[in-house]
Image (cartoon, grey):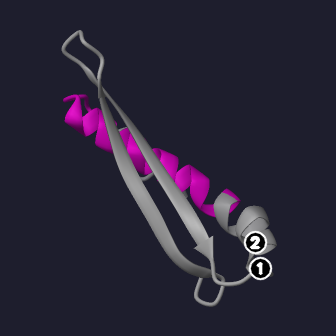
């Protein structure tokens, strides 16, 4: 991603659902290195990594909730 992505900014948002559970959202933004990199990020990088990031979030959420994550590990490409 060097030369295409200047940096990646991310954040976790935890929300108390009021019933003893917590919702977690994970946000990330890829900052393009230049204007011509926007198409590459949108068309190639995001589709390639989206599944991996979603799988990582599912594993983390399940681990925090105490669920068995054996079936999730190794997925996402």
Q: Which residue is at a point 41% across and 50% down the rendered structure image?
A: 56
Quadrant of res 6: bottom right
Viewer-nearest residue: 54 or 17:
17
Q: Secondary structure at mark 1?
A: loop
Q: Residues within 10 Å of mark 2 (few under 14, many from 20)?
A: some
Q: Is residue 66 above or below residue 38?
A: above
Question: Is 4 on the left-hand or right-hand side of 16?
Answer: right
Q: Is residue 69 visible?
A: no
The span from disc 2 to disc 1 (Cα, nearest Å) is 6 Å
Query: What percent of the width, then of the height, locates residue 13?
Result: 35, 40
Q: Which x, y percent locates residue 55? A: 46, 46
- Residue at screen point 59% across, 53% down: 50
Based on the displayed image, in which of its 4 quarters is residue 60 positioned? Answer: top left
Mark carried by residue 38: 2
Q: Which mark is residue 27?
A: none
Q: Is residue 8 above or below residue 34?
A: above
Q: Nearer the viewer, mark 2 or mark 1?
A: 1
Per the picture, the main secondary structure of the magenta-coloured stretch is helix
Q: Which residue is mark 1?
A: 35
Q: Position of residue 40 (x, y in %)?
A: 76, 73
For label 1, count other residues whose C-alpha is less than 10 Å away and answer few (under 14), some (14-19) or many (20+): few
Magenta extent: 47-69
- Asked if the residue under mark 1 is in contact with the one under mark 2, i.e. CB atoms within 8 Å, the reply is yes
Q: Quadrant of the C terminus?
A: bottom right
Magenta stretch contains residue 65:
yes
Is residue 77 highlighted in magenta?
no
Where is residue 1 shown, x and y percent of the image?
60, 82
């Amino acid at each position: 991603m060097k030369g295409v992505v200047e940096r990646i900014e991310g954040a976790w948002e935890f929300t108390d659902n009021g019933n003893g559970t917590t919702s977690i959202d994970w946000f990330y933004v890829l900052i393009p290195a230049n204007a011509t990199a926007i198409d590459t990020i949108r068309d190639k990088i995001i589709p390639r990594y989206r599944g991996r990031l979603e799988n990582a979030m599912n594993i983390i959420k399940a681990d925090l909730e105490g669920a068995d994550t054996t079936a999730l590990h190794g997925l996402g490409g």
